[in-house]
Image (tube, grey):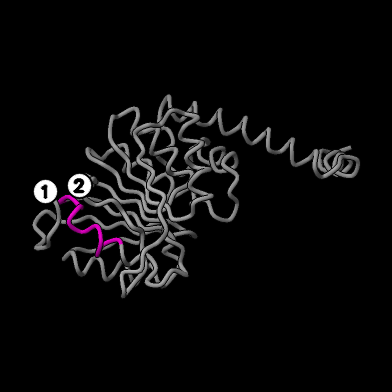
Amino acid sequence: MDLSSIEQAFRSVTPASIRRQMRSRHQNYVFNRAVNAFWRDPQAAAFPGSPIIPDLIYGWDNRGWSPSTEYLSACIRHAVETDGAILECGSGLTTVLLGLIAKRLQRPVWTLEHNGEWGERVRRRLSKYALNSVHLCIRPLRDYGDFVWYDPPLPTMPDFSLVICDGPPADTPGGRRGMLQIMRTKLRCSAVILLDDAVREQERAIAAQWAKDLNSSYQLLGGDNPYILIKILESANHPVGPR
């Protein structure tokens, strides 16, 4: 009997509730193992072919919504390389990984999340791994008139060297356009912006507008699930934060 036959036989005699429980336990085991491997060497996961990345995505168990391996690797790579604070728009698996990097390198991460239930799930994971370098801001989205976006605590926030933008949801009025309008003066010269979901025309249009406003350009990277990179030029004439 081959492996697929054994699996089919197992499914036929095991109640669905037991299978879900076993899968959940296995995912927790795999995730904890991957987190430990990531903590030992974050740079080992900074390329798409890393075996750590699929284990993290599988263990996180947010099928259909987790970032692609290429985008996740890019986030890790730039987080390791940056020398300043990190802004994350939308929370999830990246929040935990950024928290691990921030804890190791002693850099703050500020994460914006509008969904209270989801935000609390992320907060529990941060607490489990004692990732106190992450400032998780859970607030409802705010209507700014021309668009709807997060409601960040701007007066208490630092200037950012890296922005990881994977929220708010695409059906939010204005999409992710509000990031630059609201956070512009908090972005350092030479800051890097990573925008996910570039397979969508909306994200590409937003990136083109951001690049124009910043007197910069953008790169479309990745394969089947592309993302966008924008680097703010130090010589650009725009109101951003200090170097």
The image position of residue 29, as x and y in percent, is: 62, 29
Q: Residue at x 82, y 45 (%)?
A: 16
The image position of residue 18, as x and y in percent, is: 80, 38
Disc tally is 2
Q: Residue at x 47, y 70 (%)?
A: 171
Q: Residue at x 50, y 44 (%)?
A: 120
Q: Which mark is residue 136?
A: none
Q: Amino acid at mark 1?
A: Pro
The image position of residue 11, as x and y in percent, is: 85, 43
Which is more N-terminal, label 1 or label 2? 2
Q: Main secondary structure of the magenta part?
A: helix
Reply yes or no: does residue 182 show up in magenta. Answer: yes
Q: Amino acid at mark 2?
A: Asp
- In the picture, measured across the screen, residue 79 lies left or right of residue 21, that is left
Tell me if label 2 and label 1 are in contact, CB under 8 Å: yes
Reply yes or no: does residue 186 show up in magenta. Answer: yes
| Residue 56 sits above or below residue 169 on the image | above
Q: Quadrant of residue 215?
A: bottom left
Question: The N terminus lies in which quarter of the figure?
Answer: top right
Question: Where does label 2 land, which residue?
Answer: 159
Q: Residue at x 8, y 57 (%)?
A: 235
Callout 2: helix, strand or loop?
loop
Please tell me how crowded label 2 is: few (under 14), some (14-19), or many (20+) other residues with Cα within 10 Å. many
Could you give the CA–CA distance between mark 2 and mark 1, rounded to whole angstroms?
A: 8 Å
Question: Where does label 1 land, which residue?
Answer: 242
Residue 53 or 89: which is nearer the viewer?
89
Callout 1: helix, strand or loop?
loop
- In the picture, measured across the screen, residue 183 lies left or right of residue 67, that is left
| Residue 106 sits above or below residue 204 on the image | above
- In the picture, measured across the screen, residue 218 lies left or right of residue 117, that is left
Q: Which residues are magenta?
A: 179-189
